[in-house]
Amino acid sequence: ENNIKDTMLQYSKYGIYDVVGSGYIPYATQNILSWLGPVFEKNDTFDEMAKVSPIFFTGDNIHIQDAIFVGPRKNLTDNDEIKKAIMKYGSLAIEYYSSVGAPDYNNKTHAQYQNLLNERTHVVSVVGWDDNYPKENFLTTPPGDGAWILKDNFGFENGDKGYIYLSYYDVSFLNLSYAVGFIIENTEKYARNYQTDLSGNMIFFDDMFGKNVSYKITYQSQKTELISGVGTYFKYDGEPYVLNIYVNNELKHVQNGTGPYYGFHTVKLTDEIPINLGDNFTVEITKKSVPIFNNSRQHYAKDTVFMKTDDVWKDLALKNMTTSLKVYTKDLAIYTQDLVKIYKNDSKFEADVGVANETVTFDVNGVKYNRVSDENGTARIAINLNPGNYTIKTSFNGIAVENKITVLPTLIAQNLVKYFRNESQFYIALIDGTGKAISDVDITMNINGVFYNRTTDANGTARLNINLNPGEYILTATDPLTGLMMSYNITVLPVLTASDISMTYLDGTQFKAKLVDGKGNPLKNVGVTFNINGVFYTRLTDSNGTAKLNINLMAGEYIITSQYENAQISNKITVSAKKD
């Protein structure tokens, strides 16, 4: 109790402004749901005058993931929901006005009734009821029989061995606040609790038109683990929700459901989601109500907590607010890492399952393989895939995790785009399984059906001169050591270009050929030779690299050949007769 009392005060790291003493059930509930408590008294003995208590994260902390809220009562006989909750979930924590003597408290019957003050001064557990408890047992007679059975927290010396009776008609019982029942049906052993809502004044936001509202929080993972559950507050019984979970901005999980009660509920994921150390994961939920926290001493990071209204995401941290979306994770039973390896080297993909002689299943590229863990609990699989990116799924003991495998080639080269007969050539490097360059080895290259052998230099690089005519080609290179074959695109661009023309006899149309240098720049003041019907013409290129030839041919079809040094192209000229 000391820990709960002090950590909610404004003097605590996670305290609430303006709370200087005592506290309320909502604050204690936040403390418990945040795993700050409860703790055993041996860890923090009670000090009535204390204002500061350390934050405890011990192995003895009791982890609670679910809490039901009941009330407040509509009137003094509105008791059915409270009774149902006690029957289903056990005792409920409530606040009421505690009196220690006449005229409200009967020391002989340990019964209290008062109808004047609706203040709340004490927290106890309501553990049962007696509809027939006589009204005559109270010093002041209430309107009817019936009493709640309360378990006090002052020890066995107080009341009837620690129990007292509170009349159904006591005006302080659940008149303004709600009762809280902590549900322990969720027995999942979560390892971590990612959260921002450790304390504060909580209110529910509802859209004024009754529309659904979305809210989300982004966290960064502290280790490789499994996202297993998400907890938040629900304002209504049976409140529908849609839950989306993203890992590094990629949607990984969608789950629909309904909140089972008014209170805090943890949604167990139908599929647990593996995350790696440093991953950013975002939990987004859409439903009728949004729990908003403010007035806390916490400082909230910007660009982390958002609420969506009017189709606009709004950063709650800008108003020093947050919402409630706790994310619960489990430690992995499988420890794996992404693998980057060079083709056919000795690197294997490993999975540590912590136990020896157990079967581990690997799903690689759609094919499943079983491997048995060694004496250290590690299972391994050789990766003999061609260069590329792959996904591997490792399954063991009902848990599956995914990793990426990247296979790098032993041949390293780039596609080549060059102009006809310029200085650009094709270069290719050869490395071994450790990434070290290999010299004095012949690499076989096949392009356009012709094979060439080129020897690697001291840097492991071989060169093939490309003197092909303009066009697109596939070059296939072979690593003589591993047998790896890699293909590359070779594109040879023309330096001399022209288009077919159609014209009418003597209409003034010119045939134009454009000439560029080996870098694609216009080549001016050089001669381009044209051949039509065995007659040759030479024309100089202008500043744009264009050579022009007047066409005075009779009607008919002709082939014109344009040539500059080794570059030569052919085009068609169609001349139509003039119409009378």
Image (cartoon, helix red, strand yellow):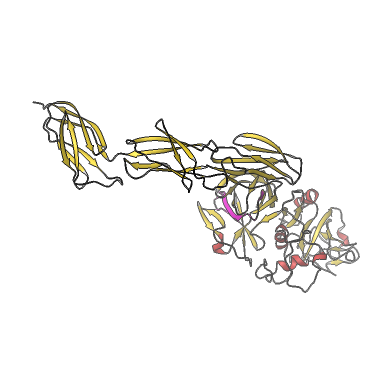
Quarter that holds the C terminus: top left
Residue 176 visible from this viewpoint: no
The answer to whether one can see residue 312 in this image is yes
Q: Nearer the viewer, residue 148 or 307?
A: 307
Q: Which residues are magenta?
A: 204-226
Q: Name the one closer to the observer, 558 or 535.
A: 535
Instruction: Return the residue found at the far left.
Output: 580
Image location (x, y in percent) of residue 339: 60, 46
- Residue 206 drawn in magenta: yes
The image quadrant of residue 179 is bottom right
**Where in the figure is residue 321, as x and y percent of width and height?**
59, 62
Q: Position of residue 159 (x, y in %)?
A: 88, 64
In this view, which residue lies farthest toward the bottom? Answer: 49
Left or right: residue 138 versus residue 292 is: right
Front residue of 406 and 131: 406
Q: Quadrant of residue 200?
A: bottom right
Magenta-drawn stretch contains 440: no
165 or 466, nearer to the observer: 466
- In the image, taking residue 443 as reference, residue 244 lies left or right, namely right
* Residue 558 position by quadrant: top left
Residue, x 28% and y 41% (percent of image)? 495
Q: Residue at x 36, y 44 (%)?
A: 424
The residue lying furthest to the front in this view is 440
Q: Whole-percent x and y of residue 483?
A: 53, 35
Q: Which quarter of the image is occupied by the N terminus?
A: bottom right
How many discs mark residues in the rendered view? 0
